[in-house]
Amino acid sequence: MNGHGSILQRQFDHLARFSRAPQIVATSVKAASPLDIVSSPWAPIIAVAVPKQVILYNSVSLQISGVLPFPEGTPTTLSFSRNGSILIAGGGRGGKSGLVVGWEVKSGKRVFEIGAEFDAVMAADITSDHSMVALGSPGRRIKIYATKNGEEIANIKKHTDWITSLAFSPDGVLLATGDRNGGLFVWESNTGNPFYTLKAHSKSITAISWRSDSNVVASSSEDGSIRLWEMNEGKQVKNWTGHGGGALDMAFNGDGNIASCGRDKLAKVWDGNGAQKIATKPFPEIPVATCLTHDGKRIVVGDWNGEIKVFDTADGKIIGNILGNPPSIQTRILNATKTAKDNRAKLIEEEKLYAQKLTLLKLHTDKIEEAKKSLNDVQTIHDQSVARLKSATDSLTENIKEQGALNEKISACNETLKSLDTQISESAEDLSKIDQLKETVTKTTATLQSHQSELDKIKARETSLRSETSTTQQTVNTLMTDIGTAETNLKSLSNENTKLNASVKDAHTTLQSVQANNHKSLNQIKYWEAQTFNVKRHQKITEKTPLSDELQEATLAMNDAQSIHDTASSETKSSEETLKNADNIVIQKQKELSNQTENLPKLKGRLTLEQLLVKHGQATIESIREAMNAASDDIKGEFQSALEKEMALLSQDQVKANKTQDLVNNSIPRAKASLSEAITNRDAAGKALNIKIKAKSSATEKLTEALASHGRAADQLSQFDKSMEKMFHEYLGMLPETL
């Protein structure tokens, strides 16, 4: 029941395939109230804590995305990191043990286990940079740990009762904590030093949540209030009664809205100033956990009976339910198999029905085609008959015109004949004129007869044309009736075809729906079979630890062998240099002995000369002494001065003679002793070199063995990684493209 702020935008393009990654476990638990519900700040993921596991859901589809096992007991508190990449759960076994577990959300891999409490962890959170985890328990202490090594950073003893809630500020600078006695404190995260004491709540703190800018922290309590505190001076800036009887959970969203639920059996959404935006309908049981989704569009609420509902924050209407008690994979496979079998039977039935309707539609379509062909044939004959009727009508019209023209000609001839008769009567005395007139009468009569004969023919043709026109008109009328009948029949068939086509479309739609359901059920089988394989894959992943340990041991052994080999090589090289130097010294000492042997006669000659000089000096000194003894006192000083000079010269000559005597007596023995010592040192260096060579050879053998062991371990681990990569790709290949 921690806050959900926002700092970084996180890429989550894998979410549609999120279920590829997390460990899905084949377990199921009895229905129980969700111990906590949290939402990822940046992705449509909801995490629900139930005994022994954390269930992940897609907050859009409300479908399960994965299950993270928590075999350590019961996870009582959940929290996403600020960028949504890490999910932590605190919990354990009451009165026995407690810890915090962290998972990488993308892969479902455990990345850390922190804490070793003697009671279940009741509150936990992780900093935005993933460097620290804080936890609280009935032990009344706040503990802060480093995630990189699990070392304790701070141990805070201020609280007087069980720790019930805590949350890091989004910037990771501060940590707010609350207890069962209403104690509310703010601490410096890195040191655990006190920052503020926030006094107002009279009963247990149920939730703490930070606004995304880290400037305001919200707290809810069994006293029913929700309070906002600013971090400049640690003062309360808002206070309202959220839920009568007690507010049981509360969380900020990234957009500054607040979700809450309480003993009034309601869940509510508030703006950042405490103004109520929506309230759900009363739950049958007390809601115990709530959160807003990453986009603030939905509020998720779980009640005491384990029922989890999702509501639209725009109007408070319910969108759907989340299954808080997911069945095992095998149960899912059995259910999916049964569903697939039912869907297959329904698919076969719908395919048969669709085929029947298609056949009926085809038969009816064939009838329509026949009706169209018949109508076209009748229409063709009708068109031909109409054309003939038009031709006959046109001919009849032309015939009538021709009759009119001939009648006019006949009338003209008759008029001419009447005129000729009149002229003949009037010209009875003019025989020549009468003859001419009679000749004209004869010609006119012949013309009249010709016209009359042609008119008779045209009238006869008119009778034929009228008969033909009448017959053709009857045919046209009959064909028009046939066309009307054919069109009516075609329209009826078309109407029926439209109904059949709609029926086929409906059947096709139903078939597609059944096919989709069948495909979905088959994909469900594939999906959960893939998850079964995924469980095996994750179980096999545990085999990597001994291989990694073996490689690590082989690497350490190889590094040790390499170090020993390098040391042996260095020491061997040093011994070789020592032996070489010893050889040079022996050669030098041999030369010195040879030189001393060759120089001995010269030394002896020089010794004889130096001894003569000593004797001569001694004699000179004795002479000076005798002369000084005999001399007067006034010149004894001169003799004394000469005596001292001669004694100094004698002393020098004596030293030279002694040195030469020493050289004569000891130079060769000393040269031999020095040569012997050099030879001894050379022999010792040779023995030491042999030892170093043997040590180097042994180190080389051990290094070779270590390299071989390291190579084998590396190959085994590489082969294991390849096999795991292959299994991962097999797993991806087993997954359906869609669910």
Image (tube, helix red, strand yellow):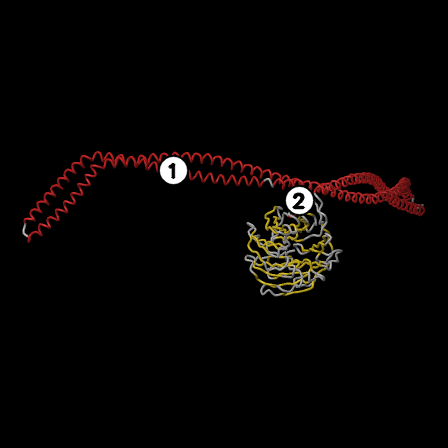
Taking the image as shown, residue 336 lies to the left or right of residue 110, namely right
Q: Position of residue 38 (x, y in %)?
A: 66, 53
Looking at the rendered structure, the kind of residue marked 1 is: Lys
Instruction: Name the spot of residue 666 as percent of width and height, x first.
Output: 22, 37
**Residue in view at x 8 percent, y 51 percent:** 638
Q: Earlier in the sequence, mark 2 or mark 1?
A: 2
**316 up-or-down from 546: above or below:** below
Cα distance in 3D space between marks 2 and 1: 60 Å
What type is the residue that disc 2 sits on?
Answer: Ile
Residue at the disc numbered 2: 24
Which image quadrant for residue 574? top left
Quick check: 158 left or right of 582? right
Asked if residue 206 shows in the view, the reply is yes
Residue on which the image places disc 1? 573
The image shows a total of numbered marks equal to 2
Q: Position of residue 506 (x, y in %)?
A: 79, 45
Q: Quadrant of the N terminus?
A: bottom right
Q: Label 2's element?
A: loop
Can see residue 373?
no
Q: Tell me which corner region of the image, top left, top right, bottom left or bottom right, holds residue 163.
A: bottom right
**Where is residue 432 drawn, in percent x and y?**
90, 43
